[in-house]
Image (spheres, rainbow, N blue to C red):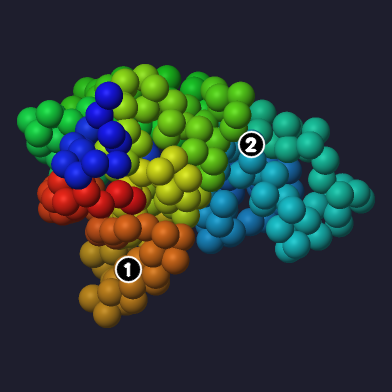
Amino acid sequence: MTNPTAPGRPLQAVIFDWAGTLVDFGSLAPTQIFVDAFDSFGIEISLQQARGPMGLSKWQHIRVLLDTPEIAAQWQRHAGRAASDADVDAIYARFMPMQIAKVGQYSQAIEGAVQVLAWLREQGLKIGSCSGYPRQVLDVLLPMAAQAGIAPDHVVAGDELAAGGRPGPYMALANVLALKIDDVAGCIKVDDTVPGIEEGLRAGMWSVGVSLSGNEVGHTRAALDCLPASEVAQLKAQAEERLRAAGAHYVIDSVADLPQVVNQIRARLAAGERP
């Protein structure tokens, strides 16, 4: 049996997040719906607050938001008590149909994604993916993405593993099993959120953060084009800092910049390095 720590181990797969990484530049689809869902219960949250726990499963995302002191105080004033898990269930039940109805409006392919996936396949690499989206939302998103040319070999939803989701390694490792990868160090996890970077690290993979197109910057391409270059540079630098602080081995602007990182990681693996 081959020694997995020996030099020359190959790169085998790239595992992608969805919103903010492959589709939905700025990760607007989940964020805006959180704002709308909370508003339907009389609770005001900002887009920035909604972005805070991004990368978690949507139920857990709502739980974390309700535990945020400012939002918890609002709920206490509104309901006369602290928010319970039953309240999380209620907001989640309101969120789900809204997300299903709106996901297609926001989930256009990020520029370069289709070409990069094709390039990865030409390199002989397998393509996995996972998302904080529940399966019901992915069932709407995936056919639209496939029509645009984005069709990974495997997809794991945020609500379908008993072990849970991010920042645990479970969704990334579910891809390893499904794709029959024999060494986690031969995988790259690409994600725009801190929990997604942690997921890849805990799974023993190379973790690549996505800054400009993702949740950490949180602007559409059109919105960024309207900002002064200095402000865009500052937003990008802040996003890169957060992703690197989470442990990202590399940070890129968008998925379009991934090939150069793939080549660097391949060379490091060939030299005997591991994540």
Do residues under tags 1 and 2 come within 8 Å of each other at their CB atoms?
Answer: no
Q: Residue at x 43, y 31 (%)?
A: 173
Image coords of residue 105 (percent x, y): 37, 36
Residue closest to the eye, 12 or 111:
12
Residue 117 visible from this viewpoint: no
Choose the circle earlier in sequence order: 1 or 2: 2
- Asked which quadrant contains residue 11, the reply is top left
**Up-down relation of residue 177 to residue 74 (above or below):** above
**Up-down relation of residue 241 to residue 270 (above or below):** below
Local secondary structure at mark 2: helix
Which residue matches tag 1?
Answer: 236
Q: Disc 1 to disc 2, how far (Cα)?
A: 29 Å
Residue closest to the eye, 80 or 166:
166
Q: Amino acid at mark 1?
A: Lys
Local secondary structure at mark 1: helix
Residue closest to the eye, 194 or 143:
194
Q: Residue at x 27, y 80 (%)?
A: 230
Q: Amino acid at mark 2?
A: Trp
Image coords of residue 92 (percent x, y): 66, 33
Identify the disc placed on residue 59. 2
Image coords of residue 110 (percent x, y): 24, 44
